[in-house]
Image (cartoon, grey):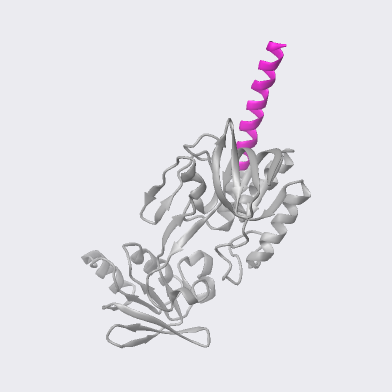
Amino acid sequence: MTENTLHDVAIVGGGAAGLSAAVTLARSLRDVVVIDAGEPRNAPAEGVHNLLGRESIAPFELVALGRAEAEGYGARMLSDSVDAVRRDGENFALTLAGGAELRARRILMATGLHDELPDVPGIAELWGTHVLHCPYCHGWEVKGQRIGVLGTSPMSMHQVILFRQLSEHITLFTHTMPELSGDDWDTLAALDVEVVSGRVREVRAENGELAAVVLDDGHEFAIEALTVAPRFVARSDVYEQLGGTLSDNPMGSFVESDFAGKTAVDGVWAAGNVSDLGAAVAASAAQGSMAGGAINADLAFSDAQAAVAARKAA
C-alpha cells in the first residue's frame, strides 16, 4: 500500500529523541509521522535516571507519555520498522516492514544504537540489570556493592575510576584488555582496586541474580554487579541506504552530524544515540528537540523560497 500523503517529516525511531522531535515539529504545525518498532534499548532497565521531573520512570511509561504528547499535537504513530528508503525526486520514499510505503520531505533518524557485548556466556542474560556500562544510568543502584569491571579495552580503566566513586569494592578482571601501563598500576594501587589476571569464562547467575565471575581456570569471584564496555554501533541502515557512511571513535561507530543534527546526506537529520553514542535519555531528548527545530526552520525557508519563486512566475 502506498500512501499519497506527502509528510513534512518522517521520524524513524520513537524513543526520547524521536518523540521529542515529534512534539517540537507538531507544535509548529508540521505533518509528522513517527515509525517505531517498540523495542527501546533501555527496555531491561527498571527505570530512567537523571531525567529531571521524571526520575526513575519506567522506560515504556516514558515512551507512552511521549507518544501521547506528540499525538496530542497531531503527530501520527506507526508501529512498524523501515525496510528500505530511497530518494523520490526532492523527497523520500520509505518502505515499511508491514508493506506500506510513505513519502516525506525530510527524514530524522532517531534509531539509536546496538550494544555489541563481550562474547562471554551469561552477560547478555543479565544485561541492563546486573551487567551495566554507565555509572550515571545505573551507578546509584549498585553503590557500595561488590562491583567487577570486565577489561576489554582502554575504556575499562575509565570505568574503574568512575565506579570506584560509587563503591570501595572494585575488582578489575583484565580479561582481554591491553596490558596495563605503569600509570594504570599506580592508579589501581592508589584506589585500592583488586586486579585479577586471566580470561573470564562465564558470568554465573543464580535465581536471576549475578553470583560470580568465573575464570578459565575455574576460579570464581563473588560479584554483585559487573560493568562492561560494549562497542556501540549506530542503527544506520536508513542513512547508509541513502549514501551516508559511518564515522568511528573509541566507543564505536556513529552517524556524524552538526550541532543541530544535520548530516552529510541532504534532507536527513540525526538525533540521540545514532549520532551521539554517549547520550543518555535527557541528552537524547534535548537533541531531538533541537533537530526538530532545525528541520522546521529548513522547511520554512524552503517554503518561503518556493512562494517567492511562484509569485515571480505568476
Residue located at (68% from left, 53% from top): 78
**Quadrant placement of the C terminus:** top right
Total marks shown come to 0
Residue located at (49% from left, 39% from top): 263
Magenta run includes residue 310: yes
Is residue 143 something that shows in the picture? no
Give the residues in magenta.
291-314
Residue 158, x across and y down, in percent: 37, 63
Classify 143 as above or below 59. below
In the image, 193 versus 7, the foreground residue is 7
95 relative position to 178: left or right: right
Residue 159, x across and y down, in percent: 39, 66
Residue located at (64% from left, 26% from top): 301
Is residue 43 something that shows in the picture? yes
256 relative position to 172: left or right: right
Q: Residue lying at the far left in this picture: please name it.
A: 182
Residue 84, x across and y down, in percent: 54, 47
Q: Quadrant of residue 296?
A: top right
Q: Main secondary structure of the magenta part?
A: helix
